[in-house]
Image (cartoon, coloured by chain):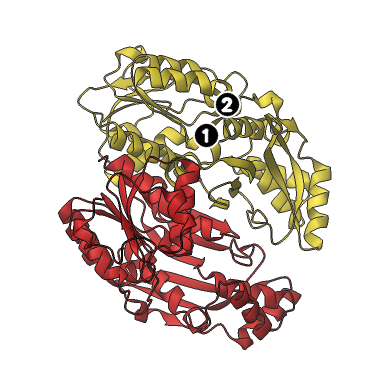
Chain colours: A red, B yellow
């Protein structure tokens, strides 16, 4: 299977390293970057060589429909508000009959129904495991382990940054220091409002609601309470009594519709989300046929984002051999 | 896809009810019981009618190879020591070119390599999700969400009975009372030694080691420490300091081989197995590519066993359409 890779930052490079390491049966035929050029080779690009370079030979990538590839891997820099340019890339690739794997929340949070319908119409697959929580098994889990089951409610921790900050506050750190530490480690952005105000978590809640619970909500429909210094103080107080304050999303059916929220919540020690500490993430899925199923990913790093993309590629490879 | 159902106790009946409820595209063509007769109808058995009966019309089921079925569902009464008669049933069905789904630990714990080789040779699938921990996603998870990853170590709680007893002791109950309660609820057997001495957990540890970590160990190779009144007292003491004592299995690579153990272990509040309370079960999988992945199933009942079988049937149906 031939892969066109759009975006060659930390995630794209981690994926390239993992493809080399696992000797997975994929050939990368195109790599495009925003500022460092592009490369196209229908016979296959030598990834080790490309990983060692800072700039690629072509000035820009040809149009997506002209790429010699069966699947587009979309890992360009995120614009969470509009979901662009990822949304345009995904749409173009599906329209051209290419499978798509994306790590970008925007297109899925804003246009899942449209994109899924387009993929079905063109007979290709759209996969996006990495959009939610690195390689935390969510959409693969749903397809493989929770078929036919109705998912009735979801609680979870999907923001590494917020969870890290509140975890450090629980250990006695000041909120500002914990946030500065997360920024120093490169997990919180220079402007941390996207995480702390819950915009990132709201996009993920919309994805979960729309994909797993057949809802049709937008990120703006998710009620948000900010993770702030007061939440940090609550986290410290909770820790003194053996509990934790965690940045939780909660999604539930409410009559005909689905409602979703984000905010700091007290979590007791026998709650399955209590031990989801630091950079870890996790979900509690309440279902009819499978009961209550919990998944967690502990202390992930960028390799786990790349692995989520790799599992999507492997599923496409198995379902739709070239 | 045509199903022959061997065993019509609580699990077999729960599966029949779930097939009716979900209108899954399967036809049950044969049902065999040990003491209440059998029924065979190549056009399909009306499950609602059979569920209302106490005895079935035929005295005994014909030989497995003569059944008009594509898949054998093996849910006969467990003989954990020898794995019989389940092992013979599974072997006969695979040999006759039928897919097999079993909820019986014995055949998988004792003869996984032989049975898997036979299934491959005959071009059929052997599935056993329900052997481990009801519908806790384990083998489906491995196939769908953890491909290519090496599983390096496993810790987990796979014994509902032991975990319930220690959980009740943590709440202040006496060990004997907690055990009697589990027996009254029908989850502990009249002779509870199979659970408390870890024979059941050892069989599950052998399955995990052999299937997920490419080991070749037998249940007898698993080091066992009994869950007893002293463990109950330790559970009560741990609870007073905010921790829990849980019945843990631990599997790890040790040089060239794989070692496995079972016994009561203290678990701190930030351990992902701390909140796996009561009848709940869970696993912590340490992997190379996916990092640390945790799955839990909270408060399962017999419907979750049936659901595990149903997910196996759906996977077979998707992979090998009749």
Q: Nearer the viewer, mark 2 or mark 1?
A: 2
Name the secondary structure under disc 1.
helix
Crowding at dot 2, Cα within 10 Å, few <14 / some 14-19 / many 20+, comes out as many
Q: Can marks 2 and 1 be said to lie on one chain?
A: yes
Left or right of A300 in this view: A261: left
- Is B188 above or below relative to B164? above
Dividing the image into 4 quarters, which one contains the N terminus of chain A?
Answer: top left
Q: Position of residue A100 (x, y in %)?
A: 29, 56
Write down the chain letter for disc 1: B
Q: Position of residue B22 (x, y in %)?
A: 30, 46
- Is A123 above or below relative to B240? above
Residue B205 figure quarter: top right
Answer whether residue A136 is visible to the viewer in this image.
Answer: no
Lower position in the chain sequence, tag 2 or tag 1: 2
Mark 2 = which residue?
A: B109
Mark 1 = which residue?
A: B131
Measured in 3D between alpha carbons, the distance from the residue under mark 2 to the one under mark 1, in whole angstroms, is: 9 Å
Crowding at dot 1, Cα within 10 Å, few <14 / some 14-19 / many 20+, comes out as many
Answer whether residue B142 is visible to the viewer in this image.
Answer: yes
Say which mark, if any, is on residue B35.
Answer: none
Q: Position of residue A241 (x, y in %)?
A: 74, 74
Q: Nearer the viewer, residue A60 or A298?
A: A60
Q: What residue is drawn where x is 46% and y is 63%? A: A54
Question: Farthest residue in the front direction?
Answer: A57
Q: Nearer the viewer, residue B179 or A55?
A: A55
Q: What residue is drawn where x is 66% and y is 72%? A: A167
CB atoms of marks 2 and 1 within 8 Å: yes
Q: What residue is drawn where x is 47% and y is 55%? A: A51
Q: Position of residue A168 (x, y in %)?
A: 68, 74
Write down the chain letter for disc 2: B
Name the secondary structure under disc 2.
helix
């Amino acid at each position: 299977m031939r892969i066109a890779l759009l975006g060659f930052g930390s995630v794209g490079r981690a994926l390239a390293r993992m493809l080399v390491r696992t000797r997975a049966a994929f050939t990368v035929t195109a790599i495009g970057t925003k500022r460092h050029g592009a490369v196209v080779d229908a016979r296959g690009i030598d990834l080790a060589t490309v990983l060692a370079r800072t700039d690629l030979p072509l000035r820009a990538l040809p149009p997506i429909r002209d790429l010699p590839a069966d699947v587009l891997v979309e890992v360009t820099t995120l614009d969470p508000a509009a979901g662009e340019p990822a949304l345009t890339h995904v749409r173009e690739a599906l329209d051209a009959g290419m499978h798509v794997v994306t790590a970008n929340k925007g297109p899925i949070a804003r246009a899942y129904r449209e994109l899924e319908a387009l993929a079905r119409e063109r007979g290709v697959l759209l996969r996006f495991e990495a959009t939610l929580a690195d390689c935390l098994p969510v959409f693969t889990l749903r397809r493989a382990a929770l078929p036919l089951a109705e998912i009735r409610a979801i609680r979870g921790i999907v923001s590494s940054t917020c969870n890290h900050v509140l975890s450090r506050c629980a250990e006695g750190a000041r909120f500002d220091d914990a946030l500065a530490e997360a920024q120093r480690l490169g997990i919180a952005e220079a402007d941390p409002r996207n995480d702390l105000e819950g915009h990132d978590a709201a996009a993920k809640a919309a994805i979960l609601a729309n994909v797993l619970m057949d809802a049709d909500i937008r990120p703006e429909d998710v009620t948000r309470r900010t993770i702030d210094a007061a939440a940090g103080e609550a986290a410290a107080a909770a820790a003194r009594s053996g509990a934790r304050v965690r940045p939780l999303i909660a999604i539930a059916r409410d009559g005909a519709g689905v409602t979703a929220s984000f905010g700091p919540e007290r979590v007791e020690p026998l709650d399955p989300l209590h031990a989801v500490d630091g950079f870890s993430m996790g979900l509690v899925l309440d279902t009819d046929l499978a009961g209550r199923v919990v998944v967690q990913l502990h202390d992930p790093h960028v390799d786990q984002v790349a692995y989520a993309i790799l599992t999507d590629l492997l599923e496409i490879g198995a379902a739709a051999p070239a």
